[in-house]
Image: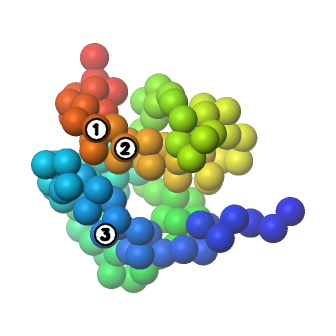
Amino acid sequence: MDKHRIYTTSVASVYPHYVTKAEKKGRTKKEVDTIICWLTGYSQEELNTHLEKKTDFETFFTEAPHLNPSRTLIKGVVCGVRVENIEEPIMREIRYLDKLIDELARGKAMEKILRKS
């Protein structure tokens, strides 16, 4: 089976859409960055480097320093598919990120988005 085209899409090309989606709902770029860093373990500097290098999604998640173990608590539907049921690991990570950005745009508190008790 061929890989989905999102794997070869650069994170930098989608990132502005994440920020725009958040800002339209009164949230900030800093909150988007916080979510991405929480999910992947990248520092802000490392995230900025990947955006500058136009790293593709597959590489971005494959090379992530520390995928947050609490990400498995992310549940729900993105693009008509339950994220917890996605079997392909990289696609599941991409959809986790989509789901977190959706939660941010819907006004959910950061503590809940970042799955803090």
Residue type at the position of mark 2: Asp
Q: Quadrant of residue 11?
A: bottom left
Residue type at the position of mark 3: Pro
- Foreground pick, 117 / 97: 97
Residue at image coords 37%, 43%: 102
Residue at image coords 61%, 67%: 7
Residue type at the position of mark 1: Arg
Circle 2 SS class: helix
* Image quadrant occupied by the N terminus: bottom right
Q: In the image, 21: left or right of 59? A: left
Q: Are marks 2 and 1 in contact (CB under 8 Å)?
A: yes
N-terminal-most mark, 3 or 2: 3
Task: Determine which of the numbered discs, if any, sits on residue 16 in the image.
Answer: 3
Residue receiving disc 2: 102
Residue receiving disc 1: 106
N-terminal-most mark, 1 or 3: 3
Circle 1 SS class: loop
Residue 114 position within the rendered picture, expressed as x and y whole percent measured from the top left? 30, 33
Residue at image coords 38%, 74%: 12
CA separation, marks 2 and 1? 6 Å
Residue at image coords 41%, 75%: 13
* Image quadrant occupied by the C terminus: top left
- Foreground pick, 62 / 83: 83
Q: Quadrant of residue 45?
A: bottom left
